[in-house]
Image (cartoon, rainbow, N blue to C red):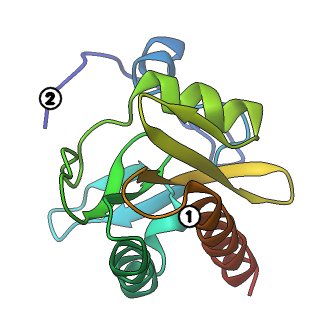
């Protein structure tokens, strides 16, 4: 853990302001959900909450099924990191940063094809949770678009439960 040298006081309601520099560096936006952890050493740790990682087996199984069905590389990611990647010719690694071009697609909330990857945003009530992406391969791109849109919608609906 790295010390920033910044000290903040807790107010009467138990709130502590996270400095702007840290929010900007970690890309924490206003209203963004945060998970709170405690350690055995008495530390309190804040971590950005990613609903896409709430059901890791579901996401992993879906990525694997989509990669098998399409015989192509498939990636699931939250807004910032790759959660899972499977399939042939896959160049993405788990926990790798999401390309900025994919982040732009997610912000527009519409599927797009970038550098051979078809990126489908996963939305929950208009909020971007992440994306599914597949590398166009031997299979029909139309079929893969339908499958990836279906999977993105399914993940979104399961997150609402």
Q: Residue at x 43, y 68 (%)?
A: 53
How busy is the neighbourhood of tag 2: few (under 14 within 10 Å), some, or many (20 plus)?
Answer: few
Q: Residue at x 36, y 45 (%)?
A: 81
Residue 89 located left or right of residue 112 = left
Where residue 136 is drawn, which disc sits there?
A: none
Q: Find residue 38 and report its horizontal and vertical position in percent.
A: 32, 66
The residue wearing badge 2 is 2
Q: Is residue 9 in view?
A: no
Q: Residue at x 15, y 63 (%)?
A: 41
Residue 88 located left or right of residue 47 = left
Q: Find residue 21 and report its horizontal and vertical position in percent.
A: 45, 11
Where residue 144 is drawn, which disc sits there?
A: 1
Q: Find residue 96 and report its horizontal and vertical position in percent.
A: 24, 42
Location of residue 155 (image quadrant): bottom right
Location of residue 31 (image quadrant): top right
Q: Can you say whether 7 is above or below 129 in the image?
A: above
Q: Find residue 157 and report its horizontal and vertical position in percent.
A: 75, 79
Nearest to the observer: residue 103 or residue 17: 103
Nearest to the observer: residue 87 or residue 102: 87
What secondary structure is marked by label 1? helix
| Quadrant of the drawing holding the N terminus | top left
| Quadrant of the drawing holding the C terminus | bottom right
Q: Residue furthest right?
A: 125
Q: Residue at x 47, y 81 (%)?
A: 55
Q: Looking at the image, is mark 1 or mark 2 nearer the viewer?
A: 1
What secondary structure is marked by label 2? loop
Nearest to the observer: residue 3 or residue 81: 81
**Dot 1 or dot 2, earlier in sequence:** 2
Q: Can you say whether 38 is above or below 137 in the image?
A: below
């Amino acid at each position: 853990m790295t010390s920033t040298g910044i000290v903040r006081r807790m107010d009467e309601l138990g709130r502590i302001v996270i400095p702007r520099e840290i929010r900007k560096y970690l890309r924490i936006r206003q209203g963004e959900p945060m998970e709170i952890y405690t350690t055995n050493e008495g530390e309190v740790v804040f971590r950005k909450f990613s609903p896409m990682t709430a059901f890791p087996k579901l996401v992993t199984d879906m990525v694997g099924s989509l990669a098998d069905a399409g015989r192509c590389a498939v990636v699931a990611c939250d807004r910032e990191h790759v959660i899972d990647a499977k399939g042939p010719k896959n160049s993405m690694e788990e926990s790798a940063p999401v390309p900025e071009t994919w982040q732009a697609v997610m912000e527009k909330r519409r599927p797009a094809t970038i550098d051979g990857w078809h990126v489908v945003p996963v939305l929950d009530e208009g909020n971007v949770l992440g994306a599914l992406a597949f590398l166009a391969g031997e299979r029909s791109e139309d079929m893969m678009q339908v499958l990836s849109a279906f999977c993105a919608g399914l993940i979104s609906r399961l997150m609402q439960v």
